[in-house]
Image: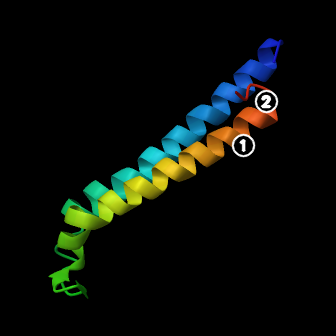
Amino acid sequence: MADKSSSNAYWAANVRVILISLTIWFICSFGMGIILRPALSGIMIGGADLGFWMAQNGSIYVFLVLIFAYASKMNKLDKEHGVEE
């Protein structure tokens, strides 16, 4: 990864992965847990409505999945651009 265009392409892809991850995290935690909570109140999961469940449990599960997806995607991206460990 010696030339500047390859470096710029790597960081552009890196920022894109980060922004997608943050968007998913925001939608699941803030959007479904706070903003859409009244709309999701009729859907029950384990004795609680979906909005409450997403605020308490679902956003944590989504965050854990995002961690592993991010690590996998970044390893793949590193190999594509020749900067793997």
Kindly identify the amino acid type of the residue bearing the numbered disc 1: Lys
Find disc 2 in the rendering and name its residue.
Answer: 81
Res 64 visible: yes
How far apart are the two marked residues, 2 and 1, measured between alpha carbons?
9 Å
Disc 2 crowd rating (10 Å Cα; few below 14, some 14-19, many 20+) is few
The vertical placement of 42 against 50, above or below, is below
Which mark is drawn over residue 76? Answer: 1
Q: Residue at x 20, y 87 (%)?
A: 42
Q: What is the quadrant of the C terminus in the image?
A: top right
- Residue 63 lies left or right of residue 49; in this view the side is right
Q: Residue 34: image x %, image y %?
A: 19, 61
Q: Residue 46: image x %, image y %?
A: 22, 85
Q: Quadrant of residue 54?
A: bottom left
Q: Earlier in the sequence, mark 2 or mark 1?
A: 1
Q: Residue 77: image x %, image y %?
A: 71, 38
Q: What is the quadrant of the N terminus in the image?
A: top right
